[in-house]
Image (cartoon, grey):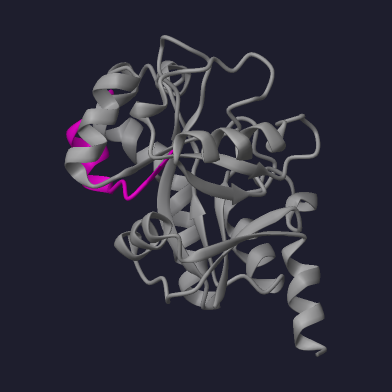
Amino acid sequence: MGLYEIHCHTSEVSACGWVDAVNVARIHKDAGFEGICITDHYHEQFFRRQVDLKDSEVVDKYLLGYRNTLEEGAKLGLKVFLGMEIKFPETPNDYLVYGITEEMLYENPYMFRMGLEAFSSMARMEGLLLIQAHPFRDNMIQINPLFLDGVETINGNLRINSRNHISNQYADEHDLIKMGGSDFHRECDINLAAMEFLPEINNNNDLVNALRDGEYTIVQNPISTQRDRSSM
């Protein structure tokens, strides 16, 4: 079993991130994580900040946090995967996407303009997972759960009330995948929540399949849990 953070931001890309990619990798490796998935924010505002760049150059810039983490992770023996946290124009909602590739971003850099329904259809054709992040925070809008594969039932962020208990109940009611993470923005977020996968995770397909098949446990205070087990 391995411990993974799959809701994680870097300061290179996400305006809300406080930790650069190299230190994101080092912090998680030092804490005993086997891998992380970088889910930087992908939305209209990011593109507007890059008005002088070509579309491919904006995608390059978006991938900078992931690529820097990947490079440092390779040195440290930390697995690093690409995800994203996408926002569509019609609501303030955030959606975590797993299985996304660099090629998909270059082919359709404006996918955040598709809207939820169209993106959900594309995601299913491409074998991606679409998970609504922190669906019961203030200002989040309830949408048709048929467009989703799952919801984030444990969001570890202590600075915002995500009402995790409602998310968990919602997932049960609609037979949705449950997912959890720290929503890592700052170094102090390292021990909030994580995923512990039963199978070995070596690529995006492994990650998506483990989530689909329910081969995981959502762990709160994961570092403390690991230490407790190692002392048994």
Q: Residue at x 80, y 90 (%)?
A: 232
Q: Quadrant of the N terminus?
A: bottom right
**Is residue 193 at least partly visible in the picture?**
yes
What residue is rendered at 52% in x and 17% in y? 142
Q: Is residue 67 magenta?
A: no
Q: Position of residue 197 (x, y in %)?
A: 51, 68
Query: Magenta stretch?
Result: 96-110
Q: Residue at x 52, y 47 (%)?
A: 178
The answer to whether residue 39 is above or below residue 14 is: below
Q: Position of residue 89 (x, y in %)?
A: 41, 11
Horizontal relation, residue 169 to residue 231: left or right? left
Quarter assignment of residue 169: top right
Residue 107 on the magenta span: yes
Residue 11 is at least partly visible in this image: no
> Residue 105: x and y, percent?
27, 38
Q: Residue at x 67, y 24 (%)?
A: 137
Quarter residue 29 falls in: bottom right
- Where does the image place residue 55, in percent across and percent down from the top left? 26, 27
Give the residue at the far bottom of this rendering.
Answer: 232
In this view, the residue in front, 86 or 222, is: 222
Q: Total number of numbered labels? A: 0
Find the residue positioned furthest to the top.
90
Picture layout, residue 135 above or below residue 181: above
In this rendering, would 184 be left or right of 9? right
Q: Where 139 sits versus 28, above or below?
A: above
Q: Is residue 5 left or right of residue 161?
A: left
Q: Quadrant of residue 185?
A: top right
Closer to us: 108 or 199: 199
